[in-house]
Image: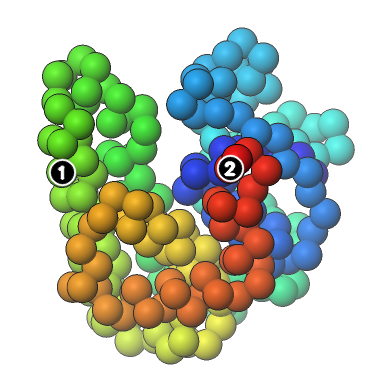
Amino acid sequence: MILYGYFRSSTAYRLRIALHWKGLPWEGRAVSLPKGEHRADAYMALNPQGALPALVEEGQPALAQSLALLDYLEETHPAPPLLPQGARERAMVRSLCQVVACDIHPVTNLRVLKELRGRWGLSEADSVEWYRHWTAEGLRSFEATLAMQGRHGAFCWGDAVTQADVCLVPAVFNARRYEVDLAPYPMLTAIADRAAALPAFAAAHPSRQPDAG
């Protein structure tokens, strides 16, 4: 497997965690978001969506979209699992994933921040406040959903690591980068810190990727 990503891309971070968790051999290819390499002709030919990550396997066309890729890895390499048994249980985990992937990420990613600054003239400080606002709103939702579901333990789903933790850890990493106040979210912060300390998560950390330097 070849994973096209960027060391600080939260979506690529999710896939690195899952690949390490499942013990799969893979090779990373760096695509710089700040340099716009994800919009270059060569990468657009590989992944017409022009986004990260992309996963290429055995000469097949690239697969894209991190949640779809997490499910693909789960279906093709089910052990060790990242989803619980049962349709309702899986839906509950996926709902947490989508708070991050569908509520926080689409309005806080780099292309949105660039558009806010370039086209709409927001200052750097205002765009950071935008980021903090929507991240905080998403984390509030995540924390409240954890409490409502009542199934959390050491991790989002009892003591089993799931896709919810895989999505949460990069979100908390980015929240800290932007100095989002995490004090209102003690449950998810503690879970994210426990998960981040696990070997598969630690190996996927942005600081440990070759393009981080």
Which mark sits nearer the N-terminus, 1 or 2?
Answer: 1
Q: Amino acid at mark 2?
A: Ala
Q: Secondary structure at mark 1?
A: helix
- Pointer 1 with pointer 2, Cβ within 8 A: no
Residue 112 falls left or right of residue 97: left
Rendering coords of residue 38 (x, y %):
55, 23
Residue at image location 15% in from the left, 43% down from the top: 129
Rendering coords of residue 96 (x, y %):
38, 65
**133 or 89, which is in the foreground?**
133
**109 or 92, which is in the foreground?**
109
Mark toward the viewer: 1 or 2: 2
Q: Above or below — where is 150 with respect to 78? A: below
Residue 66 falls left or right of residue 123: right
Q: Is residue 50 visible?
A: no
Residue position for label 2: 212
Residue at image location 42% in from the left, 63% down from the top: 168
Between the C-alphas of marks 1 and 2, the distance is 25 Å
Q: Residue furthest front?
A: 213
Q: Above or below — where is 66 with respect to 146? A: above
Residue at image location 29% in from the left, 50% down from the top: 178
Q: Above or below — where is 93 with respect to 126? A: below
Q: Residue furthest right?
A: 58
Residue position for label 1: 129
Q: Is residue 80 visible?
A: yes
Residue 193 falls left or right of residue 64: left
Rendering coords of residue 23 (x, y %):
78, 65
Q: Quadrant of the C terminus?
A: top right
Residue at image location 20% in from the left, 73% down from the top: 183
Q: Above or below — where is 95 with respect to 143? A: above
Q: Amino acid at mark 1?
A: Glu
